Image: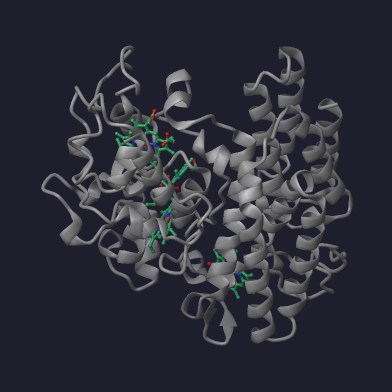
Amino acid sequence: MKLQRWIAVCVFMPGIALGSGAVDRIAAHKHLGVASCASSVCHGATQAFRESNVMQNEFALWQEFDPHATKAWQALTGAEGQAIARKLGLGDATAAKVCLDCHADNVPAGQRGEKFQVSDGVGCEACHGGSELWISSHAEKSATHADNLVKGLYPTEDPVARAELCLSCHMGTPDRMITHRIMGAGHPRLAFELDTFTWLNPHYQIDEDYIARKGDWNGVRDWAVGQGVAAVNLLEVLLDERAGFQGIFPELVLFDCHACHKPMSAGKWAPRQGTGLGPGAVRLNDSNLVMFRQVLAVVDKGASERLLTQSRALHQATLRDRAATLAAARALRDAIRAELPKVGAHAFDAQALAPILSSILADAERGEFRDFAAAEQAAMAVQSVVVAFKNAGALDEGRSHALQSRVDALYATVDREDSYAMGPFLSALREVRTAAR
Ligand code: HEC
Ligand code: HEC
Ligand code: HEC
Ligand code: HEC
């Protein structure tokens, strides 16, 4: 029996098998609706239960604090969302598939149970998967996590699977695209970092029983894996014939917004080693690639150097032609996929704090963070790394406090993308590095 369960886990856990399609897995079974989870004896308690494995007040937390509940839906009913849809000629945003796919749990009509309401926004099953097969059994004492996964519960605890799920809305995929046209109509730019975002509005906590049921938690690993999955995701969109190219231009949303959107005042250009591009080139948004290189620098130095070479090859290819670009993107995507298992299995312990910060700083000193998007990712990375080490008890109270105030100062330098400048960012980063010594 035990062995059978283990095999089931191996088959159904996505492990490192990227591209298995988070969206398809989420929609594989009927979605019964948030109301089906919200009873006071299920997940709708007002206070956390002491005797239970899970808090059981998840619904209340989600409804009150989580932007996926009311806010995600209201983004479509509100004036801003309605205006975006109107400018795009889509009519009512609450009826437009492209908007609903990310702002609600938009499974096909046949996959919706009686209590399902699309106006519930990004509901429980949009992340945990259709509950048709597991709803009646998952709370039984004898049900293991592995049993639930076999019945279609989505493995949100697995960093690769979670990254694929979150990015399907927070970055877009070939089937769920946030295009430059949508941005042009006024949609906010999307930015995501797996560890930071996982802990912004949590309805879960990692305690002893959690670890016993699902294994240990490591925020640095989640940051690291999240960067790799995001880089692969960008390349997948670029490689997709429908999504990657629009008319005579490639899809502009894949490029660094500030390559185009900045004042024309002369003399701002300077070389970036990571691209090797000359002046006047439109650069791919390589912020996740730049970060994944920092990840690899602590896991496998050689692989990190190869990634730099391959990223530069991709940037250069964008100036040649489409075939060369696609070939370079394919090679890079495959290389990152091959490295991901190593990253997922790496024990990022307290010793890794200094080298990760040093690696980011070394890149910054070379001018890699000239572009806003990469600087923003670096700030989120530094925050995640510091918090993870704080949680692991690797920093004492005083040091942790000093470090956090430097991290806050670093964040302040990426607060306004339109006025971002590398100088202040670099100084703030040096301060963080000094405080971490
Ligand atoms: C690929 C997924 C995706 C698609 C497609 C998408 N959105 Fe969004 N949208 C998001 C995410 C994610 C955010 C939140 C960004 C953040 O804060 O990080 C957002 C934010 C917004 C906001 C700002 C909300 C706020 O609280 O400030 C509005 C308005 C909005 N979207 C409307 C729309 C409309 C209208 C459409 C259809 C034309 C649409 N979106 C399509 C993912 C998407
Ligand atoms: C945006 C995605 C998302 C939505 C929406 C969401 N969850 Fe979660 N949920 C997560 C993540 C991520 C975790 C933490 C990782 C894990 O253990 O699976 C989690 C954890 C949980 C846990 C704790 C599991 C444990 O083993 O301790 C419960 C229970 C839960 N969610 C229930 C709900 C309910 C009920 C709703 C709807 C009211 C909901 N979730 C909505 C993503 C989501
Ligand atoms: C079905 C699409 C969808 C999925 C899946 C999804 N999100 Fe979201 N998320 C959204 C939308 C839409 C918003 C914007 C809500 C608003 O403010 O209008 C959002 C907002 C957020 C915010 C608030 C951002 C801010 O700027 O304050 C966080 C944090 C977040 N999501 C984390 C996650 C994480 C972590 C996951 C994966 C476990 C995830 N999301 C999965 C659609 C999604
Ligand atoms: C290759 C150059 C290029 C890149 C890269 C690019 N844009 Fe644009 N953007 C344009 C052009 C051209 C327009 C149209 C301007 C006009 O209509 O006058 C535009 C328009 C816009 C508008 C509408 C501005 C307005 O005045 O209404 C927004 C918002 C926008 N882009 C956001 C973004 C975001 C966000 C990104 C990155 C994800 C991005 N752009 C990347 C060239 C670019």
Would residue 63 appear left or right of 197 to someone viewing this image? left
Question: Does any portion of residue 129 appear in the rendered image?
Answer: yes
Compared to 345, does 252 lie above or below? below
Residue 297 or 291: which is nearer the viewer?
Answer: 297
Q: What residue appears at the point 19 percent right and 23 percent down from the top-left corner?
A: 40
Display coloring? one colour
Task: Report the number of numbered marks.
Answer: 0
Question: Does any portion of residue 419 appear in the rendered image?
Answer: no
The C terminus lies in quadrant: top right
Residue 342 or 415: which is nearer the viewer?
Answer: 342
Q: What residue appears at the point 78 percent right and 51 percent down from the top-left corner?
A: 421
Whereabouts is ligand 4, in terms of quadrant? bottom right
Q: Where does residue 172 sit, x and y in percent of width and height?
A: 48, 61
Q: Residue furthest left?
A: 114
The N terminus lies in quadrant: top left
Residue 215 or 235: which is nearer the viewer?
Answer: 215
Would residue 422 appear left or right of 26 to someone viewing this image? right
Corner quadrant of residue 150: top left
Residue 410 or 354: which is nearer the viewer?
Answer: 354
Q: Where does residue 283 sit, x and y in percent of width and height?
A: 71, 69
Would residue 272 appear left or right of 73 to someone viewing this image? right
Corner quadrant of residue 254: bottom right
Q: Where does residue 143 sit, x and y in percent of width and height?
A: 27, 31
Q: What residue appears at the point 64 percent right and 85 percent down from the top-left corner?
A: 322
Q: Where does residue 8 sit, x and y in percent of width and height?
A: 36, 46
Compared to 16, does 311 lie above or below? below
